[in-house]
Amino acid sequence: MEIPAKYDPSGIENKWYQYWLDNKFFHSVPDEREPYTIVIPPPNVTGVLHMGHMLNNTIQDVLVRRARMQGKNALWLPGTDHASIATEAKVVAKLKEEGIEKSSLTREEFLAHAWEWKEKHGGIILEQLKKLGASCDWERTKFTMDESMYESVIDVFIDLYNKGLIYRGVRMVNWDPKALTALSDEEVIYKEVKSKLYYVRYKVEDSADEWVTIATTRPETILGDTAVCYHPEDERFKHLAGKRVLVPLVKRSVPMIADEYVDREFGTGCLKITPAHDINDYNIGLKHNLESIDIFNNNGTLNEKALLYVGQDRFAVRERIVEDLLNHGHILKIEDYVNNVGFSERTDEVIEPKLSVQWFMKMDEMAKPALDVVMNDTVKFHPEKFKNTYRHWMENVRDWCISRQLWWGQRIPAYYLKTGEVIVAKSIEEALEKARILTGNSALLPQDLRQDEDVLDTWFSSWLWPISVFDGIRNPGNPDIKYYYPTNDLVTAPEILFFWVARMIMAGLEYQHDIPFKNVYLTGIVRDKLGRKMSKSLGNSPDPLELISRFGADGVRVGMLLTSPAGNDLPFDESLCEQGRNFSNKIWNALRLVKGWTIDPELPQPAYATVAVQWFESRFNDALAQIEENFSKYRLSEALMAVYKLVWDDFCAWYLEMVKPGYQQPIDPATMSATTAFFGRLMQVLHPFMPFITEEIWQLLEERKPGESIMVSTIPVSGTYDSALLSAFEHAEQVVIGIRNMRKEKNIAFKDSIELLIKGENPASAYDGVVAKLGNVSALRYVDDKPSAAAGFLVKSTEYYIPLGEGVDLAEEREKLQKELDYMQGFLDSVMKKLGNERFVSNAKPEIVDNEKRKQADAEAKIQLLKARLGELK
């Protein structure tokens, strides 16, 4: 079969992906094999593939493909997250374009639109993952709003409520005025913002002309002030104990209070207290029994309780109130000020602390065991440095606000009687039965109950993901959960370590009495060449599908992984994908070379080919040991680089050159058989990283049966190797390079054969035939003295010479040797400087010092030889 001159990934990728699907190679059912399970971090149903997804899912695919080839029953379970806030915002925006306001729809009507939107757009990202080569079991695809998943969430809510771990109460929450919902603390991103610090004075009530000055960055909240506070030990304000001051503009009389919370060094040492709009003020308000005046509507405009600026946006009011305060003589000065402001992770809106009735989950009880399993490495983090971050979060955990003021999501299963009593139940029928018992009124009807309008935080469904995808909440003893749980590896981003990873560990310990995964691989952030995080707003993020069309999926996968060690950011550049594509082309050209050879069945194997095969077998096993160690330590980038060098350098650049027959000459069957076997094994080792080209080449190397695939073949494992043989080859490699350099220097064409004279011990004698072939050497001879008319080079302490015949330019030779001597002398001086530094010798690791001493010995030996050769030329 003729191999096309160029590798065209597009057709090949579509062909093999469909082949894998048709043969159900991705599908898994429990059997007697060892399971290997990964559950996908479910992307938002609103999402499209971005560079972070590319990196994360490439890593998952590498792990699952390798496990599959190790004979494990590998399952990579895919799915999407309903993303309450993001999806509802998309649907509301779509409806607005159609002239429909959400407020004009019933809940059922709105949800019908939401489901329609989900059906149309929700599967886009999963389809895009197929282009990357993701070997997910698509038959098991889950969605967090699937009936079984929905029911699991409701069951858990009811269970935790009955255990006293979920409660309802009025609390200060982070309010998103754009999404019109509460957020958890973890959904707030703090950014440094250039603000103003306003020094505002309050008149002391019933005084002639005494004032108290406070400093604030949020003057609009003055309208909700219910106290002014100072530190009890601050002598400047002790005389104001028991007095009251008037809130500017609205003239509300509020008390002066003392509390240790106040920082005497900040601003003036006095704080305005607005319990409804600041968490710290809220806590002080509870302590001092202060009134709480909520002046904001849900959308960030001011309400009637503000008395002024009613209906106007909070930031417009800030400008107006500053103007009015200035006009009434209440502002003493305004300073530039940089402070941290909370923004909604979902909408990028400035969050507003707001008192609100919400549902909360107690976290302390679940956090401790979830912390222990990470700190004792029952769950291992890769890299380990994130254990400290995790510990900090878990030791400072707060109760989780789990309710959201949305319609898209799992509706909270709480029902209210007209008297205000709460009944938590799975259905209206069950709630009605409970209500009749509670009240003793058997005449109660469904309309006497009202279900809570809120839905649960999206994370409240995804924290169950490793369990609920196997129906482990509803059916805890089913075959899938017993076989696939706990999963093996989780690949995710450090920024959701608490959002998701910690909570999954809590849920696993609570509902399966076991960890949800054994290893957590934390990826870095994909950044551009300037170090900026890739984002649509910056316009610095390439379209992943466009990259795949240009460089091929294999090329992009290699590009993403080559510089992506766990936990470290990836400085992405398209040239990395180009490097990946070039690697594909290199392998393809190697295939064309090998498939172009003709076999002569009668031909014996030449000695140079025999030693080449022996060497590559050892080198292959040596590299496999390194690759396996890197995988065991989750060093995927290093594992790929080891495979890359094995294929490009050792196989293509050296082995194939060693064994390839002369121009238009046949090859012996033994060498061809070994070469084809090596090529196939290399493709198996490379397959997890580059699935498409490896399948194509593996199928072309040998006749395969229908239904065979590299992805379900057995990956090679490391065996024994001859380290002496490998060491000798390293020497031979330098000899060949020395010959090639000498040919270039002396303008000796490769077609012209040469003699090679060897003075001293030759550690690479086993490779004499290889050296002769690769250097076009007609004869190798050992000599006791340097020949007079010859050019030479050194490898370690062995001298190699190529006779040049008459007419050698001795002056040129002396100049070349003198340059080499000067360089080696300078090199030795730098080594001796290091070894003469007592601090270096005492502080450096012993192996580093030993390495410097070896450099010294090598340099001294070479200097001695170079001086001797210079002496011979005088």
Image (tube, rainbow, N blue to C red):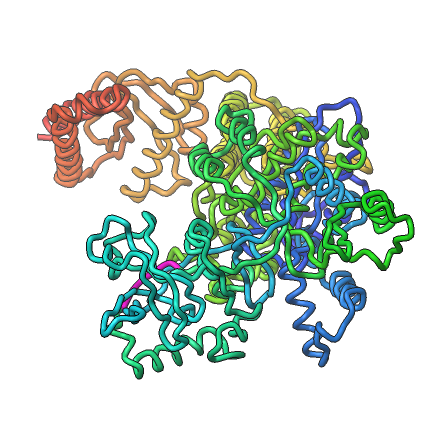
Residue 338 on the magenta span: yes
Looking at the rendering, which quadrant does residue 836 occupy? top left
Query: Would you say residue 143 is visible in this rendering?
Result: no
Q: Main secondary structure of the magenta part?
A: strand
Residue at the spot 46% in from the left edge and 39% down from the top edge? 396
**Residue furthest left as drawn:** 874
Residue 229 position (above or below residue 595)? below
Q: Position of residue 348 (x, y in %)?
A: 50, 64
Looking at the rendering, which quadrant does residue 757 occupy? top left
Q: Nearer the viewer, residue 554 or 186?
A: 186
Q: Quadrant of the N terminus?
A: top right
Q: Position of residue 863 (x, y in %)?
A: 15, 26
Residue 668 position (above or below residue 496)? above
**Residue furthest bottom as drawn:** 327
Q: Would you say 500 lies left or right of 155 here?
A: left
Q: Nearer the viewer, residue 54 or 417?
A: 417
Q: Position of residue 211 (x, y in %)?
A: 25, 69
**Residue furthest front as drawn:** 206
Residue 178 position (above or below residue 616)? below
Residue 738 on the magenta span: no
Q: Would you say 206 lies left or right of 164 here?
A: left
Q: Position of residue 72 (x, y in %)?
A: 70, 27
Residue interval drawn in magenta = 336-340
Query: Would you say residue 481 is visible in this rendering?
Result: yes
Residue at the spot 71% in from the left edge and 81% down from the top edge? 99
Q: Nearer the viewer, residue 39 or 503?
A: 503
Looking at the rendering, which quadrant does residue 853 occupy? top left
Residue at the spot 81% in from the left edge and 48% down from the top edge? 147
Q: Quadrant of the C terminus?
A: top left
